[in-house]
Image: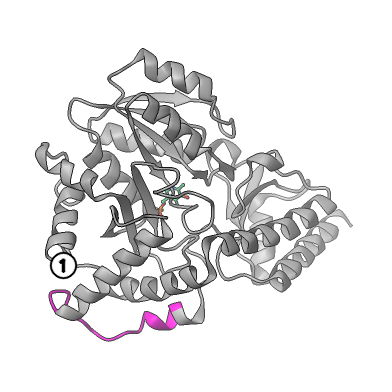
Amino acid sequence: MNPGPVMTHERVRSALAGPDMCHREPEFSRLLTRVRRKTTAVCGGGDEHTAVMLTGSGTCAVEAAISSAVPEAGGLLVIDNGHYGERLHHIARAHAVRTHRWELGWGTPVDLGALDRLLAADPGLTHVGVVHHETSTGMLNDVAAVTAIAHAHGREVVVDAVSSVGAEALSLRDDAPDWLAGSSNKCLEGAPGLSFVAARKAAFEALGSGPRRTYYLDLHRHYRAQEEAAAPAFTPGIPAFYAFDAALDLALAEGREARLARYTRLAQQLRGGLEGMGLEILLRPEHRAAALTAVRIPRGLTYAELHGGLRRDGFVIYSAQEQLAQDFFRLSTMGCMTAGEIGSFLSALERLITERHR
Ligand SMILES: *Cc1c(COP(=O)(O)O)cnc(C)c1O
């Protein structure tokens, strides 16, 4: 029940054992192009969009987007309302990008009026960084509204959609975020090891004129290799590509809305059960993403006892981070999970709590 890597479909797991392959042969070219096309589709992209694949976890894609997209003379307004917003700031700092870190407080929704004023006050903030699903709290940020305001000021938006893409509503065409960073192993239900940045082709091409902050994560380098030569710039994680190819087929067959509905049903069952035991859920219902629930650690138990006890019953739960770690833990409902499994989890949790209070 950790928020990625998730439990995967049998077809995804068995795809990992595909044949040995040279990445400079036509077979890999075809695999790469196919995966890029399907990735663009799951991001809601049209013919004018594309996705650049990277071998690395979600942070790799976020770092590639920030370090490549913000020009030397530009600046990044970081919307920080959780651990991953804070990470955007740290990434930008590591690349000497001028940043304005806007700390809202964990779990505090974005004040759109204040965003408008911040952008108006500082034309040097050429880009806005925002996390779609802030996995530290389970909060869903309104990326569409943030993008509309940023665009009204002529700014670009870099979205960390690592834990939302494939399930929560966010579309390159409809919501028009300029740079969308995602990964293979969360709501897209692939194996870990791949991430991607999706954007307009013209935006990737426009990167060509500027100086580079990074060699390995340079999105223009990856774009040119993948788009013009249908080849990876560097040795790719081939088994992760096999698995992601299969996972993307499953995602496209299910459809984003149906996947969101499936996660939502699991989350409702889970949240209903937790509240039935008197446990407190962190956020107000209207702010919660479907894929994650942050819940207060039951009285009389430590996180370690909770984790150990549930693990003995076959369930892996996930700690909260930093300021929430002491009092909360996290449960994900993304991946191949069934209502029966959520039911068994709730029974196991209830047993653990009852034993403790006897
Ligand atoms: C998981 C996650 C990441 C990436 O973390 P990795 O450890 O690099 O996979 C980035 N942003 C968010 C919101 C995430 O949930």
> As drawn, is 66 to the left or to the right of 232?
right
Instruction: Name the residue at 16% across, 79% down.
Output: 26
Q: Where, by quadrant of the figure, is residue 157 drawn?
A: top left
Count numbered badges in the picture.
1
Three-letter amino acid code of the residue under disc 1: Ala
> As drawn, is 274 to the left or to the right of 83?
right
Q: Position of residue 256 (x, y in %)?
A: 52, 61
153 versus 322 height, above or below: above
Asked whether mark 1 and ligand 1 are closer than 8 Å, the reply comes as no
209 versus 60 height, above or below: above
Q: Is residue 282 visible?
A: no
Q: Where, by quadrant of the figure, is residue 195 drawn?
A: bottom left
The residue at the far right in this view is 358
252 within the magenta span: no
- The one nearer the camera, 226 or 134, is 226
23 within the magenta span: yes
> As drawn, is 54 to the left or to the right of 58?
left
Q: Is residue 72 visible?
A: yes
In which quadrant of the rendered image does the C terminus lie?
bottom right
Instruction: Name the residue at 44% across, 28% down.
Output: 149
Instruction: Name the residue at 32% across, 71% down.
Output: 241
Q: Which residues are magenta?
A: 12-25
> As drawn, is 208 to the left or to the right of 152?
left
Q: Which residue is mark 1?
A: 231
The residue at the far front in this view is 47
29 versus 331 height, above or below: below
- The one nearer the camera, 241 or 122, is 122
Tell me the chief SS of the magenta region.
loop
Q: Position of residue 357 (x, y in %)?
A: 86, 54
Q: Position of residue 143 (x, y in %)?
A: 48, 39
Q: Residues within 10 Å of mark 1 (few under 14, many from 20)?
A: many
In which quadrant of the rendered image does the N terminus lie?
bottom right
